[in-house]
Image (cartoon, grey):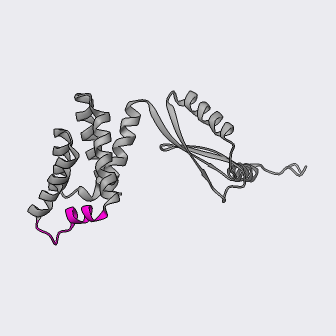
């Protein structure tokens, strides 16, 4: 949980700078390019993060990488700050958080749709359009199958959950039936 709060704090700080100088999308690309590189070349991240190596040597490696990638001065400073604060291990989560914050800034929301069976592309598009209309945002929909669902769908947009699953509907019916008193005709 701590890495989420750390990543959100750094991502928000970078976004504030990006909004101020109108380069939020540029920073999004640069940060993602860096993350893609270190995920592809795992030894780079290990060389930067491994405390067995001298801090000065690790910092030099990071500087070389940043220079080769020809990043903006803001991104160079941002990545060096992450290194200096010992937060480089969170850079992937920071990148993911930053991309989501940039999307929110542009009016894009991410949603996940869970269904018991595979849905047609037409059905998915109709659901996406309805969600977009209801939220007033452009919805990026990720579709996942969940074998634990009997039928129906569950949609999550951030912390908001729309549960139209049969399992939940049956549970709700059961709970409402528990609350109904049975009348047997006797007057008390």
Return the residue found at the far right.
Answer: 185
> Residue at 15% of width from left, 53% of height from top?
64
| Vertical relation: 149 (above or below) 25 | below
Return the residue found at the far front.
Answer: 68
Asked whether 180 or 24 is in front, the reply is 24
* Quarter of the image with the N terminus in it: bottom left
> Residue at 57% of width from left, 27% of height from top?
133
Q: What segment is highlighted magenta in the picture?
A: 42-54
Asked whether 181 or 44 is in front, the reply is 44
- Where is residue 26? Give x, y as percent: 29, 35
Is residue 92 visible in the rendered structure shown here? yes
Return the residue found at the far bottom.
Answer: 52
> Residue at 12% of width from left, 57% of height from top?
60
- Where is residue 144? Give x, y as percent: 59, 51
- Where is residue 178? Give x, y as percent: 74, 53
Going by the image, does 143 lie left or right of 88? Answer: right
Main SS of the magenta part reads helix
- In reply to whether residue 116 is colored magenta, the answer given is no
Q: How many marks?
A: 0
| Vertical relation: 64 (above or below) 30 | below
> Residue at 27% of width from left, 46% of height from top?
9
- Where is residue 10? Give x, y as percent: 26, 46
Is residue 8 visible in the rendered structure shown here? no
Going by the image, does 76 lie left or right of 156? Answer: left
């Amino acid at each position: 949980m701590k890495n989420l709060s750390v990543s959100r704090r750094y991502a928000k700080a970078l976004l504030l700078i990006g909004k101020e100088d109108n380069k939020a999308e540029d920073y999004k690309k640069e940060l993602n390019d860096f993350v893609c590189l270190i995920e592809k070349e795992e030894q780079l991240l290990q060389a930067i993060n491994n405390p067995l190596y001298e801090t000065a040597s690790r910092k030099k490696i990071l500087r070389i990488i940043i220079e080769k990638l020809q990043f903006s001065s803001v991104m160079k400073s941002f990545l060096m700050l992450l290194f200096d604060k010992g937060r480089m291990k969170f850079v992937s989560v920071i990148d993911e958080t930053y991309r989501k914050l940039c999307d929110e800034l542009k009016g894009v929301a991410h949603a996940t749709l869970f269904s018991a069976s595979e849905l047609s592309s037409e059905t998915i598009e109709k659901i996406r359009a309805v969600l977009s209309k209801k939220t007033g945002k452009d919805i990026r929909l990720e579709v996942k199958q969940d074998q634990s669902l009997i039928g129906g769908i569950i949609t999550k947009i951030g912390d908001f959950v729309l549960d139209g699953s049969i399992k939940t509907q049956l549970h709700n019916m059961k709970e409402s039936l528990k609350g109904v008193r049975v009348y047997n005709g006797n007057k008390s």
